[in-house]
Image: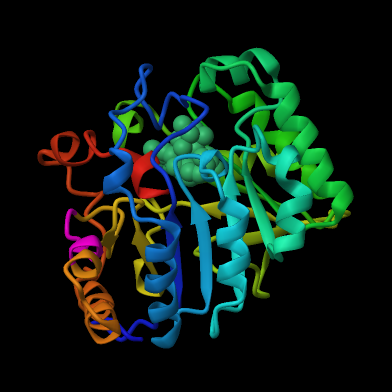
Amino acid sequence: MQDGFGRTIDYLRVSVTDKCNLRCIYCMPPGGVEWVPHREMLTFEELLRICASAAGLGISKVKVTGGEPLVRRGLTGFIRALKRTEGIGSVTLTTNALVLGDFLEELTGAGIDAVNVSLDTLNEDVFRYITRTDGFGKVMRSVNMVREAGIPLKINCVPMRGVNEDDIVPLAEFARHERTAVRFIELMPLGPGANMEAVSEAEIFELLRRAFGELRPFDGRLGNGPASYYSAAGFAGKIGFISAVSHGFCGACNRLRLTGAGLLRPCLASDAAVDMKAVLRGGGDEGAIAGALRTAAMLKPVRHDFHQTDGYNKRHGKKNMSGIGG
Ligand code: SAM
Ligand code: SF4
């Protein structure tokens, strides 16, 4: 499927829940967000109908996200069904890893292709500050279990000024001995993150260069997304940067986002959405579902508007990443 600007759309991020077992300071307010009532959330059957239709239009990669996807009961059954859906080649999961260790065997059995773990620090106190939760030990246990199981792993860190800058180099060390990719995600001005300060890609690059020597651009393909990757001498894995604001990659955007409440979003920075729940619960057939997916693709803007400062916080500061799925 192509969008209005000739970009091929082959990647769908599916947020299966808006609930989460952490309260990261850049993602959620301390008390959490108002949850969408259960009946308003799409069932796994409804999500699968949309994914099957999307696969028919050329979506071959699905990322399961949230909220925290592993808090939704029955997730591994959903992943198994996705893996059996014709046309879907890759199914991956983005998780905070708090309970990942408990589900790893089931997930492997379901055929999960890779796991992305959000890990912003290796310091227990900083973890407690960022996530407003205890649980660092459980997260690290899960990360080690994924490594031991040999499941392809990416670690995602959002560097924040004055919060976890000291973790950048130690986190990058994960890529030294194993093929793990460690990616630094630029803080986006969404939700509480709109009022926090990002650490720039240039600054992170310089910190890493001082610690590990020259970083050479890696041209090979790694994953489905917009990260730019680098190799350091003696590193088995790669270091990546995902800098949506400062290094826009909209020209290569390949994705749609489906929220758990059934809104199909063409762009993280846009309020446009197609209400898939209305299509499904209004009795829409496969043709109607495919039509709605095509409409969402055509609604993709040429680029995000994160750079416009006018009314910026007003537009994006109220959005919650946990509902959209990152
Ligand atoms: N709970 C899961 C997790 O944390 O991996 C999946 C959902 S979470 C919303 C997906 C990703 O969005 C995480 O890697 C998180 O760090 C990132 N994220 C949340 N708010 C962000 C913001 N304002 N800027 C950049 N990334 C953000
Ligand atoms: Fe939860 Fe992920 Fe948001 Fe943290 S980033 S609060 S783990 S949804």
Q: Is residue 95 left or right of residue 190?
A: right
Which image quadrant is residue 168 in? top right
Q: Where's residue 121, x and y in %?
A: 65, 28
- Rendered view: 10 above or below 260: below
Q: Where's residue 64, x and y in %?
A: 52, 56
- Rendered view: 72 above or below 244: above
Instruction: Examine the structure image and report whether residue 309 is included in the region drawn in magenta.
Output: no
Foreground residue among 124 and 146: 146
| Quadrant assignment for the N terminus | bottom left
Which image quadrant is residue 249 in? bottom left
Q: Where's residue 128, x and y in %?
A: 59, 15
Which image quadrant is residue 37 in? top left
Q: Residue at x 75, y 23 (%)?
A: 137
Foreground residue among 38 and 59: 38
Q: Residue at x 86, y 52 (%)?
A: 149
Is any part of residue 213 visible from this angle? Answer: no
Q: Where's residue 91, x and y in %?
A: 60, 66
Q: Residue at x 28, y 62 (%)?
A: 264
Residue range highlighted in magenta: 271-278
